[in-house]
Amino acid sequence: MADYNKLNAEIIEKLKVIAPNRVYVGEDINEDFTHDEMPIYGKFTPDAVVEALTTEEVAAVLKLCNANKIPVTTRGAGTGLAGGSTPIAGGIVLGTDKMNKILSIDEDTLSATVQAGVLLQDFYDAVAEKGLFYPPDPGQKFATLGGNVSTNAGGMRAVKYGTTRDYVRAMTVVTAKGEIIKLGANVKKSSSGYSLLHLMIGSEGTLGIITEITLKLLPAPKAQLSLIVPFEDIKAATSAVPKLLATGLNPQALEFMEDDIVRMGEEYLEREVFPKEFDGVKAKAYLLISFDGENMEKLEDVSEAASETLFDAGALDVLVADTPDRIKSAWSARDSFYPAISEATSELDECDVVVPITRLADYLEFVRSLRDKYQIRVSYFGHSGDGNTHIYFLKDNLPEEEFQKKVEAGMNDLYDKAKELGGLVSGEHGIGHAKQAYLAKSLGPVQMEIMQDIKRVFDPNYILNPGKVCYKL
Ligand SMILES: Cc1cc2nc3c(=O)[nH]c(=O)nc-3n(C[C@H](O)[C@H](O)[C@H](O)COP(=O)(O)OP(=O)(O)OC[C@H]3O[C@@H](n4cnc5c(N)ncnc54)[C@H](O)[C@@H]3O)c2cc1C
């Protein structure tokens, strides 16, 4: 393990010169900075929080910290789900959320350049004003774009448009030594050596600090339509997914959910969104599907063709939401699942494994078997178009120790099964420190060593987000 130094009064004074009135120590540190959205992975108080405003400030902080071997954990909005922005080695939390300026939106090159702390929702709103569209659609709209890039966030529209990675053209990065570098360019293609740009994407603050990002945009689709599709069980629902994708109808989003999670979501929202019974048959699972396109007429044809395939695949019905209000209502239910689950139990742990879409039905059958095996409530939903499932172990009234034991054994089962089916540890949430052991088991020693070598080249003193992804404390 690297030998870190403690922050002393002299270094704190220097930080205050770099970021006047934006250095917090002791009781002035907000508790939020001790964890992300998964406090179950531990709370760790940093020695100081520094809120940066510019690339140059970030560079000055890193120069100082590198010279003094002080750990630096970067934090966007702290909405991560893998303990990524948690300062487990102490030192400094470097907050980027005040770096929130949209620097330019260029309609000619269909791109925008932002500071890393811009919130996703603010970015959507700004580009929509110009008739443009930023497709990545992670569920949490109050995450920062820097956080999205650093975790390669996915979300609902990945099935059609890809993940955050597919929209990053260039970025400004501060290296561990405090050098400012520009990766990529505002161009559509590149064969210009190793792609450090793509190495930085998904690196969770372990290789450098991203301060500015140039993102690709698209013209906004003119029409949208959603389908709520009930099935007798989840196996029928997920088995319909490859059939629908094979039609080439290209859904913008394709989500699956079971009746228990729908009920939790509706209780949370205090309104019923999904019908429950069809000709005397109870719906136990649903697909929620969205299409976008040029105009409503074309989408109606698409909806008809999709319905045919879905009925052939065993759908109990196909309900069309074709007005903004109905579409919003259906998707607000989907957006409520995570807060609804959190509210429905005393504590939870989660994972977001990804498997090939043709193996999703088998995988979910296995997930369900864990309910009996461990006598614990297990809920799940996910992005069926990507084979990416969010699985939650709910503590309810279990004693803490028993819950932890069941979760550990259950998570091991889940990751082993995902590997057996050709899947990976995380589809979109990242590794942080919570999933490190599973990553190592899934990828094996050769790949982990290559990652550790890369880490050493970027960050010789291991000051950047210690104890995350491939570098264990
Ligand atoms: C209700 C809910 C729904 C969610 N839905 C989705 C979803 O659908 N898809 C999805 O992918 N995720 C989802 N998430 C997870 C989370 O929102 C994403 O991981 C998001 O990308 C994190 O952004 P953040 O700004 O909060 O980053 P943080 O949590 O602050 O940080 C995440 C990681 O990125 C690093 N980091 C942050 N900013 C920078 C930077 N500028 N430079 C270098 N490293 C940096 C941090 O060190 C940390 O390792 C959801 C979370 C919640 C709570």
Image (cartoon, rainbow, N blue to C red):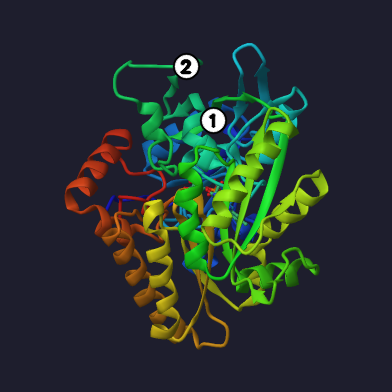
Residue with the mark numbered 2 = 188
The answer to whether marks 2 and 1 mark residues whose Cβ atoms lie closer than 8 Å is no
Residue found farthest to the left:
446
Vertical comparison of 67 with 278: above or below: above
The mark found on residue 154 in the picture is none
Vertical comparison of 47 with 184: above or below: below
Q: Residue at x 50, y 64 (%)?
A: 236
Task: Name which quarter of the figure residue 266 lies in.
Answer: bottom right
**Residue 30 place in picture, x, y as percent:** 65, 57
Amino acid carrying label 1: it is: Thr
Vertical comparison of 137 with 33: above or below: above
**Residue 411 place in picture, x, y as percent:** 38, 70
Of tags 2 and 1, the one toward the viewer is 2
- 458 or 167: nearer the viewer: 167
Dot 2 crowding, Cα within 10 Å, few <14, some 14–19, many 20+: few
Residue 449 in sight: yes
Question: Which quarter of the image is occupied by the C terminus?
Answer: bottom left
Residue with the mark numbered 1 = 211
**Residue 158 place in picture, x, y as percent:** 52, 41
User: Does the numbered disc 1 mark a residue whose Cβ is under 8 Å from ligand 1?
Assistant: yes
Label 1's element? strand
Question: Which quarter of the image is occupied by the N terminus?
Answer: bottom left
